[in-house]
Image (cartoon, rainbow, N blue to C red):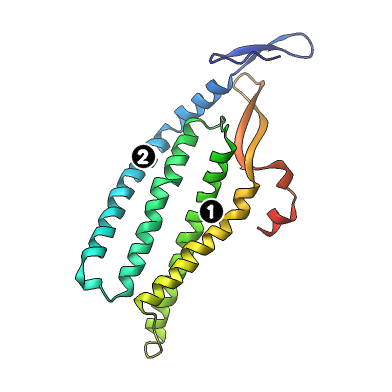
Amino acid sequence: MDSITTENVSSVNSSGHLESVESLEDLSARYADALLPLTIAFGCFTVDGIIGNLLVSLVFSLSPEYRRNNFKVFALTLAFIDLITCLTIIPAETVKQQKYFEFGHVATCKLKCFFNVFGASSYCLALLVISVDRFRKVVLPFKTQMTPKMSLWILLFVAFLLPILLSIPGTLMCGIRTTAKVNSYGTNTTIYLCETEKRFEKSVLRIIY
């Protein structure tokens, strides 16, 4: 059996020869070093995003100029979605880059998958609602327009409830997948990835999704 430690280890292959094997910790550390510039960039995005979105929320919440305006609802919605992204998805990706091949907790993996789908779909669907409102104002200016209250209810359903429903299948199919990766010694290291479980690879649910 392989002896896994924090250093490079050795194992005996089927022919009885001693092989050098890169440990899981060393493999992850090597990838973390390679991804360090991206990790730093993500850290900057997180800090800037949190500060920026809090400022946007503060300005549009307190400003009397946007009180009866759809733009206020749209701006606050996008700021809230972006704030969720800065507090969940980006930090999760940063942690993943440090332990790239050591994803050991199923619950954490599923939570990450949920927020990945939720964040992307929520932002896209919110922009869809905004584009419909802009279209009606430009092309159909004399028709009934969205009111701020109507916009709020539409966004609650389209940009929040619907993305939650869209995230459920992906969350269910996500899990820890154990596989082997060729390391720097040319031998195999067992790794643990957060991705679609093997049993869902060819399932109808995944194809439809």
Q: Nearer the viewer, residue 136 or 65?
A: 65
* Identity of the residue drawn at 35% across and 44% down: 46
CA neighbours of label 2 inside 10 A, class few (<14), some (14 to 19), many (20+): some
Residue 145 is labelled as none
On the image, the x and y values in percent for residue 140 come to: 41, 87
User: In front: mark 1 or mark 2?
Assistant: 1
Residue 43 is labelled as 2
Q: Give the residue furthest to the bottom.
A: 142
Q: Earlier in the sequence, mark 1 or mark 2?
A: 2
Residue type (three-letter) at the residue carrying disc 1: Val
Residue 117 is labelled as 1
Q: Under tag 2, what secondary structure? A: helix
* Identity of the residue drawn at 75% across and 49% down: 202
Q: Name above or below for residue 84 compared with residue 63.
A: above
Q: How many marks?
A: 2
Q: Name above or below for residue 135 compared with residue 100.
A: below
Q: Nearer the viewer, residue 21 or 126?
A: 126
* Identity of the residue drawn at 78% across and 14% down: 14
On the image, the x and y values in percent for residue 51 come to: 28, 49
Residue type (three-letter) at the residue carrying disc 2: Gly
The quadrant in which the N terminus is found is: top right
The quadrant in which the C terminus is found is: bottom right
Disc 1 from disc 2: Cα separation: 21 Å
Q: Nearer the viewer, residue 73 or 153?
A: 153
Q: Name above or below for residue 147 compared with residue 112.
A: below
On the image, the x and y values in percent for residue 159 come to: 47, 64
* Identity of the residue drawn at 38% across and 82% down: 138
CA neighbours of label 1 inside 10 A, class few (<14), some (14 to 19), many (20+): some
Tell me where residue 195 sits by quadrant: top right
Q: Are marks 1 and 2 in contact (CB under 8 Å)?
A: no
Q: Under tag 1, what secondary structure? A: helix
On the image, the x and y values in percent for residue 132 come to: 44, 76
